[in-house]
Every structure is written in structure tokens, then in C-alpha cells.
């Protein structure tokens, strides 16, 4: 039996693409292995969002040279976002790479592997645009939870972001196909799904007869075997009142919204081409908080964007203090070749950017801890997702907070009720008070 090893960098969409690759290879009788040295085919599914990811990738491909030298029949395949925009460089610097395949060429991988065996040179297949996903054709990594894509690509062109260039324009998957996928997953025992799109809120705008993400979400919520529905990522400019109402009305849509802020300064938001203002963002948050009880809100923030001054950064801090995000994923601006921001004047020193970044972290970590402390001594239903650190189990509350607790591994994939005993900024600790055998049983 042929064996494959796959390594995934980057976001949930990349993780899902790796599930597609696994499905395609296992259909051809490949067996998944956990170590690259055991494989006949190695696939690196790359990310291009940050400079760091690119450098890491080069180091990684470089390390594979030794394996290729000791086993010339080994097939090295590079896919994903960096394959899309760095194909020439990868081909030139790493001639021992066998196949480079783009984000729109995933379904071709098995035939490219066969082709490579019959010819003597490397293959590079990278389409600029397109859509080669067949609904249902993915290997579900976890038996109890699954990613389900609703759209591919993005039309927004935020000036710092490489995604529209490497994943193409937004294409929505038909609602009937998504529903069919989810029903099949539910029949197979999946109880939680994460609907995926670069901007789920603009879902359906490309259909002849427009259909919204809130309509899709309401349809998905009717599948009661799916007890937890999550989605990612929302763009504030497209988040509708209807969406908030649908979340509030359906108990199986989780009370968590990830809403990237990026900056609290209207000047910087404009330079970023985000198409909302600080005031609009705060209005959306007020609306969410007033309609969806105990809704946790997480975000992404960039510090040190070209042109950002202390005053702009203070607007970001102001939003952080007003919203009180449960968690923020914070980044120092990373220049991406080919994006509009790449050519913007940038007068802030890296030292200053790092100081702001640290200041933001200190404030946000304190808020995260205070918000988590509010959950202590309360009981929550938790889906046990796996093993955490120090021999503990790990699961998530409905609001997406992570909790660690003692328990038997056979609880993975089941619902338990947990009493929260203590809190840190990024996770909680708790104790099982009840195992929910009845899948319909909520606290
Ligand atoms: S919405 Fe903006 S940040 Fe998100 S993928 Fe599209 S261009 Fe990138």
C-alpha cells in the first residue's frame, strides 16, 4: 500500500483542503502515516498570509532534501497559498520538489502524481481562478465535528491581505449541496459543524437569485442532530440584522461571533479598505450583545499598519476597552508582496510597533481573564474534543471558551456538564458534574 504524509500550515480553510487531499488519496488506496520518513508521497499544504509563514516553508522544504536524497522515489508535493504565488521561486530554489499544485488544482493531485511518475521533470499546475471542490469529497478528521465550506475566495481586497490573490474571487456553494453535506455528516454522528468562508456574510451574493448567509444558517439550524453550529469568518461590513436575529432565535447556533476589527481608527480602516467605521463596528457589537445572550466576541487586530500613529492606535485601544473581547488574535503588520499596502508609506519604527503590540496584549489579556472569571462557579455544557495538556481532557463551551478537566478518554466526542472551577486568560479549568448520554439534553 502506498503511504502519504500531509502537513498543513495556516487557517481552517487550509485544514479543510488537507481533508480534501486525504479523501482524494485514500480513494486511490493511499494510507495516511504520521512521519514523513515513512511516506511515499509528502504533501505540504502551505500558507501565505504572513512573511513568517513563507520563511518557515522555505526551511521546511529545505529539510526534505535529505529524505529525497536517501529515497529518490519519494514524491514531494507543495500545495496551498504559497504554491499559488511563489511557484517560480519554489521551482528554482528547490529543484527536487516533484509537484507544485495551486489552490484551484487540488482535485488533480492523484493524476499529477501518476503523471510525474512517467515524466522526468517537475510538474507545476497552478490555475489563476476556478473552483474544483466537489461537495462531500473530504475526509472528516474528527468523527464528531466537521468543517463545511460555504464559499471559496474573497472579493474584498483588504489592502494588507494576500488571500484574494491566492484563492481567487468569491464563489458560493449552492445551499442544497451544503445542506446535503451536513445531513450526511449528521447521519454519520457529527454533532458540531463549522461553516467556513473567507467572508461568510457575503455568502450568496454571486447567485442569480440572491440568497443570504442568514437564510442558509436558518436552514442549517433545522437539522437538529447538529447540536452546535459555528461559522467563520464574518466581515463587519456585511453582518446583517437578520444574521443576529437568526443566531438569537436558534439554540443550536452557538453564541460566539468572531468579528475581525483590525483597527479602531477610521483613518486606518479606510487605508485598509475595510469599508466600516469604528462607530459602525461598535454599533454592531451593541446590537449583538443586546440580542444574543452571553455572546462571546473574538477578533483580529493588526498593529503597525502603514500610516498608523499613536492617536490611531489609541482608537484601537478604545474599542478593545469598550467591547471587552473575550479573545483577540493580535498581529504586527506583515508586508505581503503584491498587496496594495505593500507600497504605502510606513514611517513607524519596528520598535514602536512592538511596543504598541505589547501594550495591546497586556490590556487584552487582562480583559480576557476578567471575562473568563465571570464564568467561574457556573455550569456549562461542553463538547469533549480531545486530550489537552497534563493528561487532562479538553472541550469547548457553547461560547467557544476552552476548558480543561479530568476525565476518561472515552468521553471524547460526548457532551458533559462542567462546573467551572478557575480561569486563566486563554482557558478555563473545571470538573465534570454530569455525562450527557441523551444527546438532546441541555443544561
Ligand atoms: S475579507 Fe479582507 S482580510 Fe478577509 S480574506 Fe478577504 S481580503 Fe483578506
Image: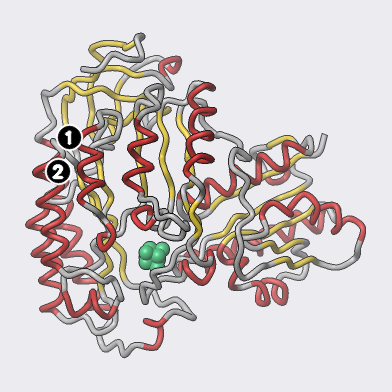
What's the CA distance linking mark 2 and mark 1? 7 Å
Using a 10 Å C-alpha cutoff, classify the residue at mark 1 as few (fewer than 14 neighbours), some (14 to 19) or many (20 or more).
many
The first of marks 2 and 1 along the sequence is 2
Position in image of residue 418 (x %, y %): 23, 20
In this orientation, does residue 392 appear?
Answer: no
The residue under the point 36% across, 14% down is 439
In front of the other: 323 or 174: 174
- The kind of secondary structure element at disc 1 is strand
**Residue at numbered disc 2:** 369
Is 31 left or right of 429, judged from the image as shown? Answer: right
Colour scheme of the rendered structure: secondary structure
The N terminus sits in image quarter? top right
When asked about the image quadrant of residue 394, the answer is top left
The C terminus sits in image quarter? top left
Position in image of residue 46 (x %, y %): 57, 59
In front of the other: 221 or 312: 221
Q: Is mark 1 within 8 Å of ligand 1?
A: no
* Numbered label attached to residue 423: 1
Amino acid at each position: 500500500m502506498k503511504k502519504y504524509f500531509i502537513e498543513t500550515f495556516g487557517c481552517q480553510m487550509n485544514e479543510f483542503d488537507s481533508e480534501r487531499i486525504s479523501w482524494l488519496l485514500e480513494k486511490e488506496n493511499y494510507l495516511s502515516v504520521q512521519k514523513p520518513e515513512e511516506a511515499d508521497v509528502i504533501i505540504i499544504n502551505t500558507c501565505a498570509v504572513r512573511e513568517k509563514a513563507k520563511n518557515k516553508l522555505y526551511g521546511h522544504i529545505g529539510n526534505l532534501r535529505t529524505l529525497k536524497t536517501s529515497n529518490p522515489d519519494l514524491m514531494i508535493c507543495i500545495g496551498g497559498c504559497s504554491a499559488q504565488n511563489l511557484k517560480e521561486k519554489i521551482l528554482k530554489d528547490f529543484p527536487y520538489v516533484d509537484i507544485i499544485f495551486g489552490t484551484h488544482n487540488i482535485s488533480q493531485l492523484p493524476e499529477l502524481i501518476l503523471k510525474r511518475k512517467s515524466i522526468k521533470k517537475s510538474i507545476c499546475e497552478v490555475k489563476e481562478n476556478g473552483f474544483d471542490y466537489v461537495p462531500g469529497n473530504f475526509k472528516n478528521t474528527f468523527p464528531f465535528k466537521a468543517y463545511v465550506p460555504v464559499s471559496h475566495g474573497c472579493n474584498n481586497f483588504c489592502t494588507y491581505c494576500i488571500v484574494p490573490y491566492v484563492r481567487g474571487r468569491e464563489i458560493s456553494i449552492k445551499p442544497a449541496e451544503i445542506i446535503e453535506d451536513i445531513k450526511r455528516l449528521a447521519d454519520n454522528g457529527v454533532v458540531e459543524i463549522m461553516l467556513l468562508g473567507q467572508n461568510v456574510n457575503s455568502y450568496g451574493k454571486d447567485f442569480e437569485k440572491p440568497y443570504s448567509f442568514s437564510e442558509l444558517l436558518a436552514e442549517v439550524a433545522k437539522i437538529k442532530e447538529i447540536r452546535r453550529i459555528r461559522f467563520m469568518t464574518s466581515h463587519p461590513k456585511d453582518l446583517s440584522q437578520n444574521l443576529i436575529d437568526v443566531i438569537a432565535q436558534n439554540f443550536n447556533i452557538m453564541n460566539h461571533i468572531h468579528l475581525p476589527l483590525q483597527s479602531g481608527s477610521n483613518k486606518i480602516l479606510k487605508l485598509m479598505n475595510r469599508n466600516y467605521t469604528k462607530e459602525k463596528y461598535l454599533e454592531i457589537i451593541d446590537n449583538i450583545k443586546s440580542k444574543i445572550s452571553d455572546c462571546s466576541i473574538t477578533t483580529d487586530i493588526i498593529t503597525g499598519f502603514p500610516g498608523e500613529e499613536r492617536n490611531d492606535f489609541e482608537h484601537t485601544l478604545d474599542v478593545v476597552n469598550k467591547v471587552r473581547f473575550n479573545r483577540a488574535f493580535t498581529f504586527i503588520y506583515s508586508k505581503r508582496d503584491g498587496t496594495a499596502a505593500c507600497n504605502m508609506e510606513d514611517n513607524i519604527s519596528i520598535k514602536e510597533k512592538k511596543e504598541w503590540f505589547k501594550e495591546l496584549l497586556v490590556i487584552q489579556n487582562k480583559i480576557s481573564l476578567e471575562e473568563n472569571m465571570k464564568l467561574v462557579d457556573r455550569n456549562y455544557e461542553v463538547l469533549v474534543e480531545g486530550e489537552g495538556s497534563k493528561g487532562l481532557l479538553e472541550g469547548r463551551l457553547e461560547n467557544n471558551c476552552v476548558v480543561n478537566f479530568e476525565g476518561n478518554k472515552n468521553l471524547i466526542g460526548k457532551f458533559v456538564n462542567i462546573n467551572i472551577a478557575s480561569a486563566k486568560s486563554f482557558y478555563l479549568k473545571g470538573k465534570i458534574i454530569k455525562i450527557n448520554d441523551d444527546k438532546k439534553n441541555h443544561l
